[in-house]
Image (spheres, rainbow, N blue to C red):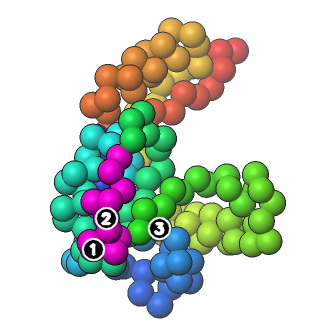
Amino acid sequence: MCCMLMLPRVFKGNKLERVLESAPLLIKTFAFRAKIGLNSTEKHWRNMTEVIAPQGKICSIVEMQEPVDLTALQQKSVTFVWEWMFTRAFYQTSDMIEQHHLLNELGKLVDAGKIRTTLSERLEPITAANLRQAHKKVEMGRMMGKIVLEHFPA
């Protein structure tokens, strides 16, 4: 699984770009102004700190198992941030409605075929055996995309 997601600037002038521009989710491919750690941030930390542009942003969406050296960001004035999709709801922030707007816009882009989901496999029905199978695949650390367990047995 890749630890960095890089998306082209396809949303120019779009409301989603304006929302994501202020969040650490929109990734610029040309200048490497931003990086997002999708798995094992600490394992890829050195590479991320080397390729990130001065005054760039590194975002992680996963917890770290070991500490990282934040001083590696100092000379480039790089920002490190965490992103957790439930922060607004969990802390009932004043901008909670933005999550609603963002997800609605994202849904429209998925429906229009402009963004694809990360779904790579479906397992059915939802059973203990299928749950173990899905968990084993994820634990191996080589999986690309997401596994969906669906449909309870009748």
Q: Which residues are magenta?
A: 68-78
The picture places residue 129, in percent across and down from the top left corner, at 51, 9
Figure quadrant of the N terminus = top left
The front one of 78 and 6 is 78
Alpha-carbon span between mark 2 and mark 3: 16 Å
Q: Residues within 10 Å of mark 2 (few under 14, many from 20)?
A: many
Q: Secondary structure at mark 1?
A: loop
Contact flag, marks 2 and 3 (Cβ < 8 Å):
no
Residue 8 seen anywhere in this rendered image of the structure:
no
Image coords of residue 57 (percent x, y): 38, 69
Tag 1 and tag 2, C-beta contact below 8 Å: yes
Question: Which mark is in front, 3 or 1?
Answer: 1
Q: Between 79 and 128, which is closer to the camera in this rendering?
A: 79
- The residue at which mark 1 appears reads as 76
| 149 left or right of 35 in image | right
Q: CA distance from mark 1 to mark 2?
A: 6 Å
Eyeballing the image, is 151 above or below 16? above
Predominant secondary structure in magenta? loop
**Mark 2: secondary structure:** helix
Q: CA distance from mark 3 to mark 1?
A: 17 Å
| Residue type at the position of mark 1 | Lys
**Residue 125 location in percent, x, y?**
57, 19
> Based on the displayed image, in which of its 4 quarters is residue 94 positioned?
bottom right
